[in-house]
Image (spheres, rainbow, N blue to C red):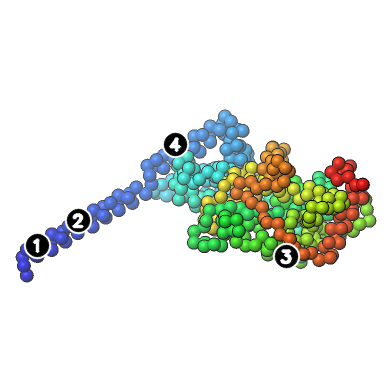
Amino acid sequence: MDPMAVMDTLRDCVTLLQLVKQARDLQSQKKRLWVRPWLKRRSDKSVYNNLVQELSLEDHDSFKFFHRVNQDQFLELLSLVEPLISKQDTRMRKAVTSHERLSVTLRHLATGESKQSLGYAYRISPNLLSRIIPEVCEALYQMLHTSHLKLPQTEDEWRRVQADYNHEWQFPNCMGALDGKRVLIGKPAKSGSIYYDYKSNFSVIMLALVDAKYKFLYVDVGGAGRASDGGVWDKCTLNRAVQGNVIGIPPPSTLPYSNIVCPSVLVGDDAFPLRMNLMKPYPGKNLTPERMNFNYRLSRARRTSENAFGILSAKFRIFKQPIITSQKNISKIILATVVLHNYLRSKTPDEYRIEEQRGQQHQTGNAGQPEDAGAMRGLARIPRNADNDAKAVREQFMAYFNNEGRVDWQERMAPLH
């Protein structure tokens, strides 16, 4: 064998070994930098340990605006979720505290600020925030939904809802207002066209039942964007519960100051079918004054759901743009905002009234017609056939609203001649 060839081969081997060693050294250096130096200064330099602490001592209103909850509410929420979100320190680093975890999650929901931006402010890596935020949202829902997102299950509970609707919106026997929204999202990875809707957006469908005081009674989240708007209610668990009467719905009763007997009903718009227990407006434009009066009365009651969505998006501005997160975390974020909305309406109803006004403005355009707010889009209006029994119930309500159930201000809306 040629000695020169042997020497060339040996030199090549040495060069290869040197390259391998350099690559390993570089990889080792990267591993030693698994925590960036500026992240280690979180306890001294982060927005939570500086600005938030200043706000808690000096400016309570700004603290509330920053988190959408006041200090007492923040501490109450923390006491509820802390057992579920707290982590132990390790030998390598200190864990993000439960206070910081709750703060950054509330800030994300309140503003929709990106994880990268929040990461710089809170000095928490975006990858860790991608785990923290869904985990805290899930904990909030787990601890709050039993007391703040409860569908009535007895006749007495439903009658209290009906009494509120009759008192506030002059629509007796109403168990709540139905509405559905498409919540825009970023395209989930490996989802294909499942979430691609007919308006060329990626979205999930959120269906809700709202009481007379803008509180959510029931929420269904997760319908894929390509699902038909017409089939959302048909596949909903609430629809099956209402049809099977397994939630204690009151039997038909006499409407106030009349002899007219009508069933307990939900109210919705043209995205829903007309059923004996679900009222919707009369279709068309050239309606009789009597039917116009019915449509107006139903619209007043139904607007509670429109306004509830408007209040929700005004309070939690994460709904002002498509939600960027993984497929499994979308529902966690939406449900967390819903229970927080109900929690705040229960705790501070007077302070929440400014949000009512903002919600109404967000949901109503200059002509008084509903308009979409940010990343929430209404469901399509779909013509449907109705059976004669459902039409008869609507006729009974129409007759009542134009006779015994007529109110003084109704004269100005659609006078009868």
Point out residue 89 in the picture as x, y percentages from the top left corner: 45, 48
Q: Answer with mark 1 or mark 3, whichever residue precedes in sequence.
A: 1
Label 3: element kind: helix
Horizontal side, residue 405 vs residue 273: left or right: right
Amino acid type, mark 1: Met
Q: Answer with mark 2 or mark 4, whichever residue precedes in sequence.
A: 2
The one nearer the camera, 202 or 71, is: 202
Residue 102 visible? The answer is no
The one nearer the camera, 270 or 56, is: 270
Q: Which mark is residue 44?
A: 4
Residue occupied by mark 1: 7
Q: Give the CA separation, mark 4 to mark 1.
A: 59 Å
Q: Residues within 10 Å of mark 4 (few under 14, many from 20)?
A: few
Amino acid type, mark 3: Arg
Q: Which mark is residue 18?
A: 2
Q: Are marks 1 and 3 in contact (CB under 8 Å)?
A: no
Q: Answer with mark 2 or mark 1, whichever residue precedes in sequence.
A: 1
Q: Residues within 10 Å of mark 2 (few under 14, many from 20)?
A: few
Mark in the foreground, 2 or 4: 2
What residue do we see at 88% from left, 57% from top?
396
Horizontal side, residue 227 vs residue 122: left or right: right
Residue occupied by mark 3: 240
Label 1: element kind: helix
Amino acid type, mark 2: Gln
Above or below, 228 against 123 in this view is below
Label 4: element kind: helix
Q: Residues within 10 Å of mark 1 (few under 14, many from 20)?
A: few
